[in-house]
Amino acid sequence: MSFCARLSAVAPWALLAIIVLTLAALQLFDLELWSHTEAPGTPEQALQVADSSTCSLREFLNGTAAGRIVVLAVNGRPSRVTWDELYGGMVRVGAQREVRPIRGASFVLVGAMDARLGSAISKVGVQEVEAELEKGQEVGSTGVLAPCRITAKSIGDSEGIGRAIISVGGVWCSPNRPGVNVVVVDESGHCVSRAHFR
């Protein structure tokens, strides 16, 4: 077999290996660039709201006023306890009872406290999922209007490093820590509380 024949037999496999390694490196180092208007700095620099993660997810949701917008995004694989609390608490935010994402999947939910069943926006997937609302847009069919632009992105543990990004009015509010990240937005578009639950 000549050198050219060997090279043509190996070249497609080598090219495929380079593509796979490049995609893996992009996920590992998270080279997705967010504009400075979308997510300036880190959550700690951009937001001075206290992180309320000292309670459970159930207690956090129960302490949230009716009508407030609640944004949930999963980073990685939450613990079994937190995942069970998420199942129970999603209904309070307007999720359908049938929504049962697999633990470790990418998942975002945008709803309103005490909204009717099935009125919230939820997205689940193996790869990154995103929910985005423009100012004045209704949050699903909750009857609540978004007071500003709200963006939520999630990556579970299927793509390596997880991520949960929540931006409210151009400010990065998510703690972006492993587990379920939650941000509560009031009618004026301010993040009034946030938390993460491992």
Image (cartoon, rainbow, N blue to C red):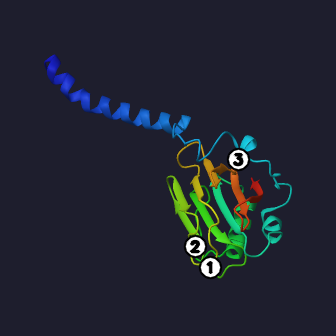
Circle 3: residue type:
Arg
Quick check: can you spot residue 76?
A: no
Q: Residues within 10 Å of mark 3 (few under 14, many from 20)?
A: some
Q: Position of residue 22 (x, y in %)?
A: 42, 33
For the residues labelled 2 and 3, the Cα–Cα distance comes to 28 Å
Q: Which mark is residue 138?
A: 2
| Residue placed under numbered mark 1 in the picture | 143
Of pointers 2 and 3, the one earlier in the residue sequence = 2
Residue drawn 58% across the image and 53% down it: 154
Q: Position of residue 169 (x, y in %)?
A: 64, 55
Where is 188 relative to 119, above or below? above
Of pointers 2 and 1, the one earlier in the residue sequence = 2
Q: Secondary structure at mark 3?
A: loop
Q: Nearer the viewer, residue 185 or 181?
A: 185
Q: Secondary structure at mark 2?
A: loop
For the residues labelled 2 and 1, the Cα–Cα distance comes to 6 Å
Q: Nearer the viewer, residue 167 or 72?
A: 167
Q: Position of residue 149 (x, y in %)?
A: 59, 59
Where is 63 relative to 4, above or below? below
Circle 2: residue type:
Glu
Instruction: Nearest to the eye among marks 3 and 1: give it.
Output: 1
Circle 1: residue type:
Gly
Of pointers 3 and 1, the one earlier in the residue sequence = 1
Q: Quadrant of residue 44?
A: top right
Residue drawn 53% across the image and 57% down it: 130
| Residue placed under numbered mark 3 in the picture | 177
Residue drawn 57% across the image and 67% down it: 122
Pointer 2 and pointer 1: residues touching (CB < 8 Å)? Answer: yes
Q: Which mark is residue 1?
A: none
Pointer 3 and pointer 1: residues touching (CB < 8 Å)? Answer: no
Q: Quadrant of residue 153?
A: bottom right
